[in-house]
Image: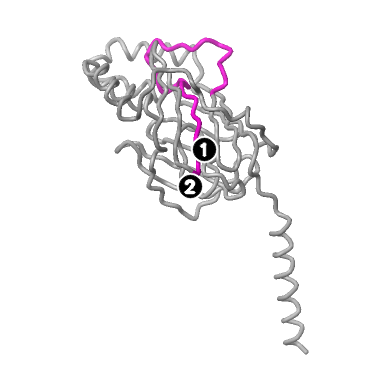
């Protein structure tokens, strides 16, 4: 009798789990709002060297007294089963870029076909706009067991290194079975709802996810800009920044993210 009771209890647990799985809703269409946060104090402090500290240190101290520590920028990611469109939300307050804080800007509109593995990126680089058509960035993700809840979704952590030196921490959810994410971050078995670049003092985290049908006109690839590829843009930047010294590294990273 006792064995039969245990067997029945086990069957009930399995049945409940099956029913839950059948009723679980997986969002395949919708819009995600992201918040990008940049630690300006830390970012600008990195620019101070022994050669410029006599005037840069007072500038930083004045900045810390008059400006908030974190610059906050917003963007949206519209997605369907096999497409995503990342778009910055225009700032209402003009940006203060006197220090050339390229990382504290949002200059990219990115359309991605997640099935074909291709992207079309409209990138604003100074006074020029480029239309970069190429394959999506290949990222060698290492998935961990850490779980974090973001915008109501349980997300699993994955780590990677991009552009040879940028350490990336991402959190994705398989409850949104679309291999997308903010900016050019993708390639995980679900939607990326959080990205942190610890050494670049920058994060992107979803603040809301709206699960709703999306019409085709809401996910259109950008069409304006000087046509190029990733390799072509890299060559252009290398030529333009060749005399910038150490400052070129930060600009190079920001424009290629």
Tell me the magenta residue range.
Answer: 88-115
What residue is at 40 percent from the left and 37 percent from the top? 135
Residue that mark 2 sits on? 188
User: Spatial distance from mark 1 to mark 2, Cα to Cα?
Assistant: 9 Å
Between 137 and 53, the residue placed more toward the observer is 137
Of marks 1 and 2, which one's residue comes earlier in the chain?
A: 1
Residue 36: say if magenta. Answer: no
Circle 2 SS class:
loop
Decide: few, some or many residues near mark 2? Use Cα within 10 Å; few <14, some 14-19, many ≥20: many
**Mark 1 highlights which residue?**
181
Residue 122 left/right relative to 161 = right
Q: Residues within 10 Å of mark 1 (few under 14, many from 20)?
A: many
Q: Is residue 109 magenta?
A: yes
The overriding secondary structure of the stretch rendered in magenta is: loop
Residue drawn at (55%, 42%), measured in percent from left and top? 82
- Quadrant in the picture for the C terminus: top left
Secondary structure, mark 1, is loop
Which quadrant would residue 48 be assigned to in this image?
top left
Residue at image x 46%, y 37%? 185
Q: Are marks 1 and 2 in contact (CB under 8 Å)?
A: yes
Q: Position of residue 122 (x, y in %)?
A: 45, 23
Place of residue 145 in the rendered image (x, y in percent of width and height, measured from the top left)? 49, 55
Q: Residue furthest bottom?
A: 1
Name the residue rendered at 30%, 26% in the picture: 232
């Amino acid at each position: 009798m006792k064995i039969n009771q245990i067997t029945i209890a086990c069957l009930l647990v399995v049945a409940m789990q099956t029913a839950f799985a059948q009723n679980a809703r997986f969002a395949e269409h919708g819009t995600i709002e992201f918040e990008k946060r940049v630690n300006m104090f830390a970012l600008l402090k990195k620019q101070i060297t022994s050669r410029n500290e006599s005037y840069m240190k007072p500038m930083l101290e004045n900045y810390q007294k008059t400006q908030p520590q974190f610059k906050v920028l917003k963007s949206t990611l519209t997605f369907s089963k096999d497409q995503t469109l990342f778009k910055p939300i225009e700032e209402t307050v003009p940006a203060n870029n006197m220090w050339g804080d390229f990382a504290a800007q949002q200059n990219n509109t990115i359309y991605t076909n997640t099935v074909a593995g291709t992207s079309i990126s409209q990138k604003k680089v100074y006074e020029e706009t480029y239309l970069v058509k190429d394959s999506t960035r290949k990222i060698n993700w290492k998935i961990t067991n850490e779980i974090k809840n973001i915008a109501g979704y349980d997300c699993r952590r994955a780590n990677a290194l991009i552009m040879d030196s940028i350490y990336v921490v991402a959190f994705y959810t398989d409850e949104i079975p679309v291999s997308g994410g903010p900016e050019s971050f993708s390639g995980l078995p679900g939607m990326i709802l959080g990205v942190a670049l610890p050494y670049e003092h920058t994060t992107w985290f979803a603040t809301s996810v709206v699960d709703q049908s999306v019409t085709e006109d809401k996910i259109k690839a950008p069409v304006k800009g000087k046509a190029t590829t990733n390799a072509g843009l890299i060559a252009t930047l290398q030529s333009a920044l060749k005399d910038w010294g150490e400052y070129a590294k930060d600009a190079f990273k920001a424009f290629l993210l």
